[in-house]
Image (cartoon, grey):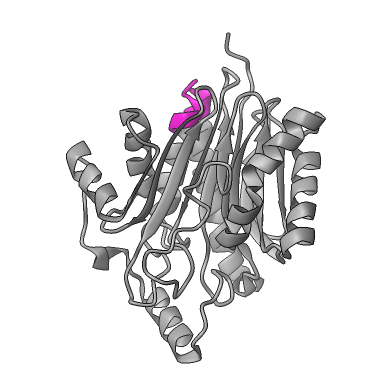
Amino acid sequence: MASESFSLMIHGGAGRIREAQDPLVAEQYHAAMLRVLEAGRESLARGERALDTVEYCAALLEDDPLFNAGIGAALTREGTVELDAAIMDGETLGVGAVGAVRGIANPIRLARAILEDGAHVLLVAEGAASFARQAGLPLIDESRLITAQRREQLERTLRRGTVTLDHDEPAPGTIGAVARDQHGHLAAATSTGGMNGQRPGRVGDSPIAGAGVYADDHTAAISATGLGEHFLRSVFAKDLADHIELLGLGAAEALTASLRRLRERLDGYGGAIVIDREGHCAAGTTTPRMIHGWIEHGSASETRIDP
């Protein structure tokens, strides 16, 4: 039986985000978050599934060049766009994911198609692109995904000779969406272009269930953002869910505990958004800032850049 409340959270990355100190830039981020939250609200208020809503919200964020996913994604050291994404259904524990896929504007749509197909969980590179063609998803010229800002950022990185995290320079980050629908079901989605100047073929935590994304109706829906290697090594999202399931913690307490472990064990760099099985929302990061927003139990939309 449906309840009267639903919850939704989205994020646009964590890091230094120095450019957000400019009020005009900060307003762009807040406006982008609010637009997606209100679109998600309409979906959930109609009684649509959490799984459909997080896919929808993630695709909207992928289409916004403000963020490092889809259009405006980070470039590899060879100047190519390789995208990672995953979506997870908390009701069934179904997962669809793609890694290092090229020529597709909305990898979250491809991840959903993989989930629905059911034969595999994760497809990468040309295998993922081939499945996209079979599924009837449109492939596009990769040049349409590349922005001038990303080209300039890569050029600076190559001159310096070191790979940078998403927010070491003016460049937004990984996106994510988590939701609890009116039927009490949870879902999570994460999508990214990875790290500026990364090696071709590098895959981070975003498409890995239990690391950068996780959803289970018995615990929580989680989307992480930051240095993917840290979230992979700590199995961050599953660690957080286990704090809820095994210790009986709520979203905020579980996130605090997992971020503390991430910081103490790995000096981990990043954060996450969480909605627990009761619909409570929480966000936190070890970085100076995180772009995020939320609707808790059907209340007014709120957005924030600082933790």
Residue nearer the viewer, 27 or 74: 74
Residue at left offset 35%, top offset 29%: 118
Per the image, is 51 magenta?
yes
Residue 243, located in which quarter of the rendered image? top right
Residue 205 in percent (x, y) is at 53, 53
Residue at left offset 73%, top offset 65%: 267
> Left or right: 281 with respect to 228?
right
Residue nearer the viewer, 66 or 277: 277
Residue 121 in percent (x, y) is at 40, 38
Q: Looking at the image, is 49 positioned above or below residue 280? A: above
Q: How many marks?
A: 0
Q: Please state, as top left, top right, bottom left or bottom right, where the C terminus lies in the image.
A: bottom right
Residue at left offset 59%, top offset 76%: 168
Residue 72 in percent (x, y) is at 39, 65
Q: Residue furthest toward the bottom?
A: 159
Q: Please state, as top left, top right, bottom left or bottom right, where the N terminus lies in the image.
A: top right
Residue 57 in percent (x, y) is at 46, 42
Chain part drawn in magenta: 43-52
> Left or right: 37 with respect to 252?
left
Question: Visible in this render: residue 22?
Answer: no
Per the image, is 182 magenta?
no
Q: Looking at the image, is 35 positioned above or below residue 147? A: above
Q: Looking at the image, is 220 positioned above or below residue 138? A: above
Q: Main secondary structure of the magenta part?
A: helix
Question: Visible in this render: residue 204?
Answer: yes
Residue 119, located in which quarter of the rendered image? top left
